[in-house]
Image (spheres, rainbow, N blue to C red):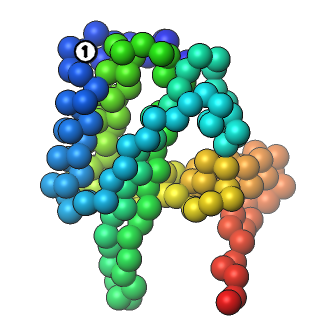
């Protein structure tokens, strides 16, 4: 998969510089809680992500403060994973450049009014533990998409209602 990516293939920007630029990009948008994680092939396979032998993944998690129009406030957890990065420094540099420009373009879409933040990042909203990769995309992909494709129904509850304590 990642072997076929041409964009930023020959980048001279070290992954650490790209990571710092991602941090600056997020901080300039009042996002202060950020975490980068390198994930092994074994960890990602256990989580249910299709991985190629000898590769790893990079995960970026950040929490965006928000307040809805009805006054409900909190943070939106975002989880973005780049899978199948070969064990090669240049490929790691490339992956981080892809991630930087991916995020930059998403924020341009939000800031120009093309999309709301939640709409633009919906696939990456983290759902918490016990959901494999645990994003809205994974929930949609496993619960709703098959029913839409089969024509069975598109009125499907993607998430279970919150448990009462």
**Residue 148, image x, y percentages:** 74, 51
Q: Quadrant of residue 89?
A: top left
Residue depicted at x 70% and y 82% = 163
Residue depicted at x 31% and y 70% = 65
Task: Give the quarter of the figure containing the N terminus.
Answer: top right
| In-front residue for pair 8/87 | 87
Residue depicted at x 39% and y 85% = 72
Q: Quadrant of residue 42?
A: top right
**Residue 90, image x, y percentages:** 34, 13
Kind of element beneath mark 1? loop
10 Å neighbourhood of mark 1: few (<14), some, or many (≥20)?
Answer: some
Residue 153 sits above or below residue 160 on the image: above
**Residue 94, image x, y percentages:** 34, 20
Residue depicted at x 61% and y 28% = 41
Q: Is residue 112 left or right of residue 95?
A: left
Residue 148 seen in render = no
Residue 124 sits above or below residue 99 on the image: below
Residue 154 sits above or below residue 58 on the image: below
**Residue 111, image x, y percentages:** 22, 56
Residue 77 seen in render = yes
Task: Give the quarter of the figure containing the C terminus.
Answer: bottom right
> To which residue does mark 1 refer?
11
| In-front residue for pair 11/157 | 11
**Count of numbered badges drawn on the protein:** 1
């Amino acid at each position: 998969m990642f072997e076929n990516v041409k964009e930023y293939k020959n980048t001279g920007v070290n992954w650490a510089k790209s990571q710092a630029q991602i941090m600056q990009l997020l901080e300039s948008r009042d996002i202060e809680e950020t975490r980068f994680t390198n994930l092994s092939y074994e960890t990602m396979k256990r989580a249910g992500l299709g991985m190629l032998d000898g590769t790893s993944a990079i995960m970026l998690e950040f929490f965006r403060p928000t307040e809805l129009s009805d006054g409900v406030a909190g943070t939106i957890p975002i989880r973005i994973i780049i899978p199948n990065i070969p064990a090669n420094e240049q490929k790691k540099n490339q992956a981080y450049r892809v991630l930087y420009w991916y995020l930059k373009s998403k924020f341009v879409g939000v800031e120009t009014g093309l999309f709301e933040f939640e709409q633009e990042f919906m696939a990456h909203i983290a759902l918490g533990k016990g959901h494999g990769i645990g994003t809205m995309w994974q929930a949609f992909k496993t619960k709703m998409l098959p029913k839409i494709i089969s024509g069975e129904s598109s009125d499907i509850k993607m998430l279970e209602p919150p448990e009462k304590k």
